[in-house]
Image: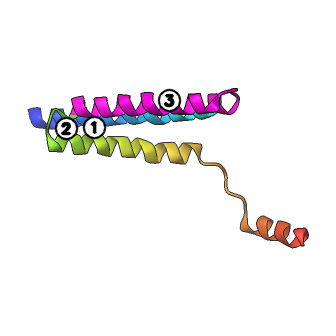
Amino acid sequence: MNEILNLVSALAAGFLLGAIFFGGLWWTVQKGLSSRQPAAWFLGSLLLRTITVVAGVYFASGNHLERLLMCLFGFFIVRRIAIRLIRLPEEEPDQLTKEAINAT
């Protein structure tokens, strides 16, 4: 029972770390696009987000492979959710064909 609780907590830590990482990425893109120094925003954010996630995975895994895998699994689940939430609506292929024909 204790091991199951450890795995569930590692999965929850992966969810949290994924939310921090991808939420921070979204926030950085919003800030970086309107900034005078976007390179500093993106580099600083990348370093901060990466250090946070690596340290979080290290502590959540507790030197156990099963916990490490559960934490990474939670992280990648949040990644898939973030991709679905932020994805831009796709244009219809017919519209792109019409635009290409009109351009010639």
Q: CA distance from mark 3 to mark 2?
A: 29 Å
Q: Which residue is mark 3?
A: 45
Instruction: Find out whether the residues at labels 2 and 1 contact each other: C-beta distance under 8 Å.
Output: yes
Which stretch is magenta? 31-60
Q: CA distance from mark 1 to mark 3?
A: 24 Å
> Which amino acid type is shown beneath numbered disc 3?
Ser
Tell me the residue at 52%/35% (across/down). Answer: 25
- 49 relative to 4 in the view: left or right: right
Instruction: Find out whether the residues at labels 1 and 3 contact each other: C-beta distance under 8 Å.
Output: no
> Which amino acid type is shown beneath numbered disc 2?
Leu
Quadrant of residue 104 within the rendered picture: bottom right
- 46 relative to 34 in the view: left or right: left
Q: CA distance from mark 2 to mark 1?
A: 6 Å
Tell me the residue at 60%/33% (across/down). Answer: 39
Q: Which residue is mark 2?
A: 7
User: Which SS class for mark 2?
Assistant: helix
The answer to whether any part of residue 35 appears in the image is yes
Q: Nearer the viewer, mark 3 or mark 2?
A: 3
Q: Percent from the top left, x then y, of residue 27?
A: 57, 30
User: Which SS class for mark 3?
Assistant: helix
First in sequence, mark 3 or 2: give its number.
2
Q: Is residue 75 positioned above or below 53 on the image?
A: below
> Which amino acid type is shown beneath numbered disc 1?
Leu
Tell me the residue at 58%/43% (across/down). Answer: 86
Which circle marks residue 11 in the picture? 1
Q: Is residue 30 positioned above or below 97 on the image?
A: above
Queried whether the magenta region covers residue 43, the answer comes back as: yes
